Amino acid sequence: MATIKDVAKLAGVALSTASYALSGDSKVSPKTRAKVLEAARSLNYRKNGIAMDLKRSRTNTIALILTDLSGPYYSELIRSIQDVALAHGHDLIACSSMGERDSTAIKFLREKRVDGAVVLAHNIADDILLESAGERFPIIVMDRELTGDHLVNVLVDGEQGGYRATQYLIEAGHRSIAYISGPLNSYDNQQRYKGFQRAMHESGLSEKPKWRLSGGFVREGGYSATKMMIMQGELPTAVFYGNDEMAVGGMKAFEDHGISIPDEVSVIGFDDIELAGYANPPLTTVRQPKSEAGSLAGHLLFQMLDGESVDEQFKLGIELVERKSVRKREH
């Protein structure tokens, strides 16, 4: 049986370098890491932590890895998955991913410290998920279209949600519409923006480059992006925020500058967090099935842990929730 010393020798690197590379440590360059992994594959070497995993009994714990643990959307998701885990006699560990290859979240995946994982963290690379998933370590991914052995998708139809929100504004008579985006590398944001663009294109409308602003999916970002829009002078008649958190921040910025919603600017969000109904005015938004998606992800994970076969991808629908933040415009 090959040892890590054999891998280091074949790759032409120091033993410590081989160890760092196999652990995904950021100290090692991508080129060197690729060389070590290739040597490990050719020798059929398996890291001790993984080999031990094949022998160990279950931990009765699953992990939920998120980009961020704060915010109402994530808290509802955590609750729904935790309920499923407890019903199956398991504990849930929720942790955030900083996107670093030697972070705690990555170690949970690479070293199989739990029985399986649900991942909603756009800053974890595809290759890490594909390498980590296995028969005894299934992974449910909720933020990208990625399938592989023992890796399953649970997605919400964000493109249709973005399309429906924008279409609703257009049907209300709006022709100058801005989209405030989340992180540019977020799959959810990309899908919602794609739907926005499709609805605009179908109606012969185009967005103004100066309104192309990002709020990072957080309330403070929505406030700052909206303030920047106000500072530029010309305002759209409607703003579609990529999530409700940014919409709430944006509404506060409009209020601070004496701009009335919906009389002067209409606002629509995405998610339907609990706070949306308590905003002033109550926020029109696109509801995505947060609890349902979390529960489904949890149930699928336990089905896979029990050796059952499941479909590779599940896509859930959306629903428009009309409240008071959008006003119809007369022409």
Image: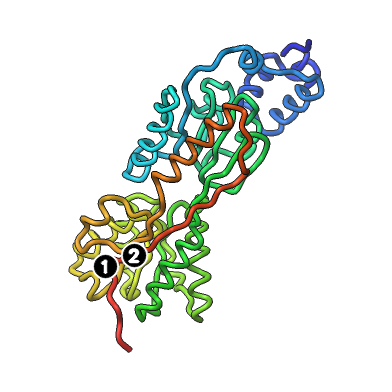
- Secondary structure found at label 1: loop
Q: Residue at x 78, y 23 (%)?
A: 39
Against 56, is 30 above or below?
A: below
Q: Residue at x 64, y 37 (%)?
A: 127
Q: Are marks 2 and 1 in contact (CB under 8 Å)?
A: yes
Circle 1 residue: 325
Against 4, is 315 above or below?
A: below
**Would you identify the image quadrant in which residue 170 lies?**
bottom left
Q: Residue at x 35, y 41 (%)?
A: 76
Residue 318 image offset from top left, x and y in percent:
43, 58
- The amino acid marked with disc number 2 is Ile
Q: Where the C terminus falls, by quadrant?
A: bottom left
Q: Where the N terminus falls, by quadrant?
A: top right
- Secondary structure found at label 2: strand
**Would you identify the image quadrant in which residue 110 lies?**
top right
Circle 2 residue: 268
Residue 229 image offset from top left, x and y in percent:
34, 67
In the image: residue 209, left or right of residue 40: left
Looking at marks 2 and 1 on the same chain, the residue that comes earlier in the sequence is marked by 2
Q: Residue at x 80, y 19 (%)?
A: 43
Asked whether 158 or 85 is in front, the reply is 85
Crowd around label 1: few <14 · some 14–19 · many ≥20 (10 Å): many
**Would you identify the image quadrant in which residue 57 lies?**
top right
In the image: residue 244, left or right of residue 294: left
